[in-house]
Image: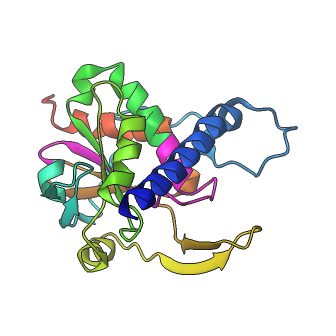
């Protein structure tokens, strides 16, 4: 039964990955005439030119929160240990999310950031991306390992994490102001579906474990994230 359950979970994850792979090119470059939901800016080009790196400041917002997590290989770790002394982009998702402008958007934008970091290895050495599931009941290490395998590309570090259970997860959610609401419903085929209502947030954390920016849907764009990363890196460069 356990083996069957894992196969079913991996099949569902691969289906979700396939949907993402299809969405990325269509939403980023598709025409306005296509019959699709309104996309957030992160799916395509910005309608304005963001400030250049180093021309603005990102004051600390509040300290980041540590916590116990499980890596995709099922080994225990802590968030601060994984952050080390790098700049961090931290996101929260769940693999069963079907909201185009929710978890798939976060993954798509970070994937674009990863591609840009891979083009600049020196910059990639200073940045880590961490994605935590807030659905530990379903998103086991085996499930998040599928995401890591799919997104593992180049030198840019991107870890997919889960937790032992909700009690380990809750202090992390509280620290970052994440309050997903779990609810169950049935799809068009009558199958029971577990979903989470949540606000999409991605956190920029500096080397001192201070949150320096929090991106919502309207500002989650690779151009903005890359400029912010470079701005923080320029802080440590002597004049």
Q: Residue at x 26, y 80 (%)?
A: 167
Q: Is residue 46 visible?
A: no
Specify the quadrant that holds the N terminus.
Answer: bottom left
Question: Which one is nearer the viewer's eye here, 96 or 113?
Answer: 96
Question: Which one is nearer the viewer's eye here, 21 or 30?
Answer: 21
Q: Is residue 51 left or right of residue 165?
A: right
Q: Residue at x 50, y 79 (%)?
A: 181
Question: Which one is nearer the viewer's eye here, 39 or 14?
Answer: 14
x and y, in percent, of residue 22 in the image: 65, 36
Outermost front residue = 1
x and y, in percent, of residue 149 in the image: 37, 37
Q: Residue at x 59, y 36 (%)?
A: 21
Specify the quadrant that holds the C terminus.
Answer: top left
Residue 180 in the image: above or below residue 157: below
x and y, in percent, of residue 213 in the image: 36, 55
Q: Is residue 152 visible?
A: yes
Query: Can you tell which quarter of the image residue 147 is in?
Result: top left
**Magenta stretch contains residue 233:** no
Q: Is residue 52 left or right of residue 14?
A: left
Outermost right residue = 33
**Magenta stretch contains residue 86:** yes
Residue 163 in the image: above or below residue 77: below
Q: Residue at x 40, y 72 (%)?
A: 178
How did the renderer colour the structure?
rainbow
x and y, in percent, of residue 80 in the image: 14, 56
Q: Which residues are magenta?
A: 84-108
Total labels drawn: 0
């Amino acid at each position: 039964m356990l083996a069957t359950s894992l196969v079913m979970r991996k099949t569902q994850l691969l289906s979700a990955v396939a949907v993402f792979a299809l969405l990325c090119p269509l939403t980023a470059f598709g025409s306005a005439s296509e019959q699709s939901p309104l996309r957030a800016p992160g799916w395509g080009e910005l309608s304005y030119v963001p400030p250049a790196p180093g021309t603005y400041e990102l004051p600390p917002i509040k300290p980041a929160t540590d916590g116990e997590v499980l890596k995709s290989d099922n080994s225990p770790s802590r968030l601060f240990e994984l952050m080390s002394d790098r700049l961090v982009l931290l996101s929260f998702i769940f693999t069963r999310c079907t909201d185009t402008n929710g978890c798939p958007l976060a993954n798509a934008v970070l994937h674009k950031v990863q591609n840009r970091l891979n083009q600049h290895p020196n910059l990639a050495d200073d940045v880590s991306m961490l994605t935590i599931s807030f659905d530990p009941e379903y998103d086991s290490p085996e499930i998040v390992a599928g995401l890591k395998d799919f997104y593992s590309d180049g030198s840019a570090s991107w870890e997919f994490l889960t937790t032992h259970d909700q009690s380990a997860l809750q202090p992390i959610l509280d620290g970052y102001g994440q309050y997903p609401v779990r609810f169950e419903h049935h799809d068009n085929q009558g199958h029971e579906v577990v979903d989470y209502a949540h606000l999409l947030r991605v956190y920029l954390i500096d080397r001192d474990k201070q949150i320096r920016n929090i991106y919502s849907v309207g500002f989650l764009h690779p151009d903005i994230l890359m400029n912010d990363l470079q701005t923080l890196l320029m802080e440590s460069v002597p004049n």
